[in-house]
Image: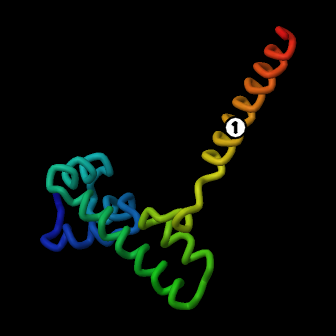
Amino acid sequence: MSIPKDGKQKYKEAYSHNLLAKDWDISLAALDSYATEQGWDKEHKLYWQDVALEVLKKGTEEHNLVATKELLRAVGITRPVGRPSKSEVQKHLAIEAHIANEFAEDVARLKAVK
């Protein structure tokens, strides 16, 4: 393979591995398999995640609401503390409605027995 000495750094920072493979005159499959063997694919992913987080941090500093929401989603905080998700609220309401229906049926049945 004709991978240069600084190939690891170029692979890690590359936006397009297809263009990189063409520049190095190797197939994309060969480049991907070599990168996987060397662990470059994981470093590439971490590098671009760090770049994306830095961009989101800058957007947050500029009070960009969309960047703030994306940054919160990226770090795993999707809702303000204490606020349940919509599906949890709907599930809770459905359970309450079911219990209320059962109670009304029981009361009607007990009144019919007297």
Pinpoint residue 7: horizontal percent, then vertical percent: 20, 68
Q: In this view, does 99 lie above or below 52?
A: above
Image-based side of 44 in relation to 87, left or right: left
Image-based side of 77 in relation to 92, left or right: left
Q: Which residue is drawn at 75% across and 34% down?
A: 97
Crowding near the residue tagged with mark 1, few <14, some 14–19, many ≥20 C-alpha atoms within 10 Å: few
- Please, which residue is most extreme toward the top here? 113
Pinpoint residue 61: horizontal percent, then vertical percent: 51, 89
* Quarter of the image where the N terminus is located: bottom left
* Quarter of the image where the C terminus is located: top right
Q: What residue type is labelled 1?
A: Glu
Q: Which residue is drawn at 53% across and 84% down?
A: 59
Q: Quadrant of residue 35?
A: bottom left
Pinpoint residue 46: horizontal percent, then vertical percent: 30, 66
Tell me the residue that label 1 is attached to.
Answer: 96
Image-based side of 44 in relation to 90, left or right: left
Q: Residue at x 27, y 68 (%)?
A: 12
- Please, which residue is most extreme toward the bottom here? 62
**What scheme was used to colour the molecule?**
rainbow
Image-based side of 18 in relation to 73, left or right: left
